[in-house]
Image (tube, rainbow, N blue to C red):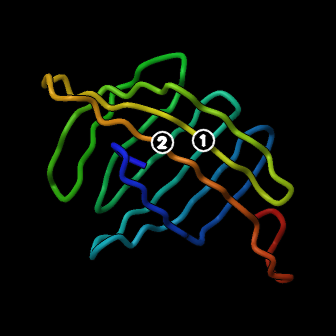
Amino acid sequence: MIDGDEAHYDYQGEYRQKGGSYNIAYTDYAGNEITKVAIEATETAMLLHRVGGITADMMFDPTVETVVKYDALSLRHGFLLRTDAYRVTELENGVSIYSEYSLNDGSGQPEISGIQEMTITMMEDADHEESV
């Protein structure tokens, strides 16, 4: 949800949990652009890395504000990212990652407020490797 507008997306990708780190990778085919997405989440913070139609690194860490350089369709913009809430919940067959955040571009315009909740589940395919 961004500024009150709710959206839902489903992706297939790769998920790996190892030593308290949750790693997710998938491809976003929004519009006619392709964006590769990688997420590394721990109990305390999450890095969301995008390359392609959208290019940005966003660090969701409630202990610090971070700078985000956001490039979408050759439009570049900088933001200060503040994470107001963040939690990771292990599920029986995956993980749930929740964050509340705001983006401020320093222009004096109202901040962009967002909530994201990701539920990552293992596929129920008998041929699917447990480690991937």
Q: Which mark is residue 98?
A: 1
Q: What is the x, y in percent for residue 33?
A: 29, 71
Q: Nearer the viewer, residue 110 or 87?
A: 110
Q: How many marks?
A: 2
Residue drawn at (48%, 63%) of the image: 8
What residue is at 32 percent from the left and 51 percent from the top? Answer: 55
Horizontal relation, residue 47 to residue 53: left or right: right
Graded by Cα atoms within 10 Å as few (under 14), some (14 to 19) or many (20 or more), the crowding at tag 1 reads some
Q: Which dot marks residue 115?
A: 2
Under circle 2, the secondary element is: strand
Q: Quadrant of the C terminus?
A: bottom right
| Residue type, mark 1 in image | Tyr
Badge 1 marks a residue whose secondary structure is strand
- Crowding around mark 2 (Cα neighbors within 10 Å: few <14, some 14 to 19, many 20+) is some
Which kind of residue does numbered mark 2 sit on? Answer: Ile
Quadrant hosting residue 106: top left
